[in-house]
Image: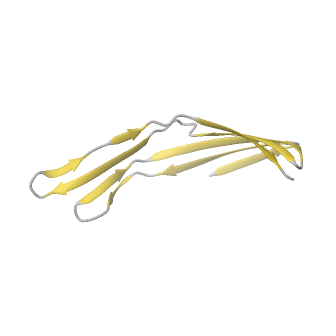
Amino acid sequence: MGVDYKAGALTTGASLAHRRGRPVRVTVNRGFDRSSRSDLDAYALWAFNPALQLRVAASNLLEQDDEFGPSYSDPVSGVETRTWRYPRGVSLRTTLEMTF
């Protein structure tokens, strides 16, 4: 879902995306858990003139980490699982856009 708003030289916008978590089977005895997450991103764009614009964008505003959980099913030892968490903070990006 996304929304944009324009007022004169300023354009702003935001988007929200959700991915549901679920187990995924790769082979008969291998798989992984895909965690659910929601991503919120926003931007502001200042158009100084048609050839010069400044864009400021922020991503992962909800500060959700990435998680990955592979599993292996062994007939002797059972199911082995691991979980890795990859911390992610808010990312801020500034871009000067020029048209030649």
* Left or right of 92 in this view: 21: left
Q: Is residue 35 above or below residue 27?
A: above
Q: How is the image coloured?
A: secondary structure
Residue at figure coordinates x 87%, y 53% from the top left: 100
Q: Is residue 42 above or below residue 21?
A: above
In the rendered image, residue 53, in percent from the top left (x then y), is placed at 82, 44
* Left or right of 14 in this view: 73: left
In the rendered image, residue 97, in percent from the top left (x then y), is placed at 79, 46
In the rendered image, residue 92, in percent from the top left (x then y), is placed at 64, 36
Q: How many marks?
A: 0
Foreground of the two, 56 or 6: 56
Foreground of the two, 92 or 64: 92
Foreground of the two, 42 or 89: 89
Residue at figure coordinates x 77%, y 46% from the top left: 5
Q: Is residue 86 above or below residue 3?
A: above
Foreground of the two, 23 or 97: 97
Outermost left residue: 76
Outermost bottom residue: 28
Outermost right residue: 49
Residue at figure coordinates x 45%, y 36% from the top left: 87
Outermost front residue: 100
Q: Is residue 74 above or below residue 53?
A: below
- Quarter where residue 22 is shown: bottom left
In the rendered image, residue 12, in percent from the top left (x then y), is placed at 75, 42
